[in-house]
Image (cartoon, rainbow, N blue to C red):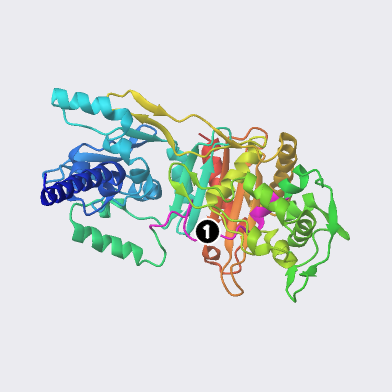
Amino acid sequence: MNKELRRVSTVVLLMFVALFASSSFIQVITADSLNADGRNVRTLYDSYSAERGPILVDGVAIAESTPIDDQYKYQRSYTQAELYANVTGYFTLNQSNPGIEGAMNDYLSGTADAQFLDNLTSIVTGQDPKGAAVELTLDPVAQQAAYDALGDQRGSVVAIRPDTGEIIAMVSKPSYDPNLLAVHDYDTFAAAYDTLTSDPTRPLVNRAIGGDLYHPGSVFKVIMAAAAIDSGEFTADSTFPNPASLTLPGTSSVITNSSGGACGAGDEASIATALRLSCNIPMAELGEALGADTIDDYASRFGFGDDLDIPLSVTPSIYPIDEIGNDVSKLMLSSFGQSDDRVTPLQIAMVSAAVANGGVLMKPNLVESIIAPDLTELKSFQPEVYNTPISADTATKLTQMMVAGVSDGAASNARINGVDVAGKTGTAENGSNDPYTLWFTGFAPADDPEVAVAVVVENGGGLGQSGFGNSVAAPIAKKVLEAVLNK
């Protein structure tokens, strides 16, 4: 073989190698990203070619697909749309689908590995392919109660069954109508989407699990009390100096209790009294005594910093250990939920759920089961222990302290006749002139908990800096607790 022919053969061989490598890379490495690319019209049409499975609550479809006479074959529609929008999300042309529609897309579209044989059978028998149904853990009574109780306020309500981790209510307001986005015309979709994204109230943000996160304020004191007692360094009766105001070390900043005076009578205040009356100064002093590392440890045990999926992706809550460093003033502020503490309502509900469940935190979950078109169960989600942040003894003591907070303390508006409610309010500051963020978290019945709840209300509940967690958030939580307990 002459030199020129060898050169041509080598070039041809290298071209074949390059073609093989390129096609293998596309088919194996980049297939998923190409399928997910919104510009892939073939994938877009394929995603509509099968009847998408319904999303169910208590066996009733809150999202389903019906036949339609266009190239997409099926139209996605949502009943009680605004009630469930932050959970369902929407299914639309651009395929960047939020909520359960996106998180469970493989099953809903019928493309999950567990559905391979069903799809093969459909091809052989000539039947139209169908996606699986996704049954949620939401309780329609609890969801409706949370939605109604929140009313026109901006904020969120999350309710969890402490012993299983099942999320039975997840409301975010303001809400939106996903039917406006589940359309087959891109211009119509874009107009609706632009309207929603330009709305300053951010209706597309699921405040329960994401967004900008909130200062927790005094609901963080539950974690502080848990860390103090569970560490063995303190008891509920451990006391701290009880001034009416305190200048933070190294600063000219002065902190006070919400009452403006001392934390109850006497020169000293106990941890139990500080939690019951929601006092800032004793908690700040406790924080200095515990240290940032211990507080961070216990916050982490409750889930702070974790990338959690339920299966929706949850923004991690933050205890700002790195920002605090050796700054005692920031440490003391963080000890009553200020400084750079940031949380989701789900995280705060998880804290109460762990206390309610004897110190055992169950993994929160929104999906109960996945059901094939022939009604066989493809997957069932079982309760799963996420962590054990505190001992059973600590949980019992915290429960007693939180019950006192409702029966004879700062969370009195969560009282329910004939039921012991354990609870904690919060009124978080956001700036010198900004409205407060208002909180309640707790569970009931205290002696045999059925539900743990977290409520957050933005913008001071419309009252600026005159609103408090007990006056605005606690009554909302009470209605949700009553709805569950009265079923």
Quadrant of the drawing holding the N terminus: top left
Q: Which residue position holds label 1?
A: 213
Q: Amino acid at mark 1?
A: Leu
Q: Quadrant of residue 197?
A: bottom left
Instruction: List x then y, in percent, for residue 378.
Output: 36, 27
Instruction: List x then y, in percent, for residue 238.
Output: 84, 50
Using residue 124 as the reference point, say whether residue 226 is left or right of it: right
> What residue do we see at 51% from left, 50% from top?
157
Are there few (<14), some (14-19), or many (20+) residues within 10 Å of tag 1? some
Number of numbered discs on residues: 1
> What residue do we see at 52% from left, 58% from top?
213
> What residue do we see at 61% from left, 57% from top?
216
Segment tinted magenta in the rendering: 204-224
Camera-side residue of 200 and 249: 249
Disc 1 is placed on an element classified as loop
Instruction: Say if residue 258 shows up in the picture.
Output: no
The magenta stretch spans residue 206: yes
Instruction: Say if residue 352 shows up in the picture.
Output: yes
Vertical comparison of 388 with 70: above or below: above
Q: Residue furthest bottom?
A: 252
Vertical comparison of 309 with 257: above or below: above
Q: Residue furthest front?
A: 2
Vertical comparison of 359 with 478: above or below: above
Q: Quadrant of residue 181?
A: bottom left
Please name the predominant secondary structure of the magenta segment in the image: loop
> What residue do we see at 79% from left, 51% from top?
271
Instruction: List x then y, in percent, for residue 17.
Output: 22, 45
The magenta stretch spans residue 57: no
Using residue 182 as the reference point, say whether residue 446 is left or right of it: right
Q: Quadrant of residue 78?
A: top left
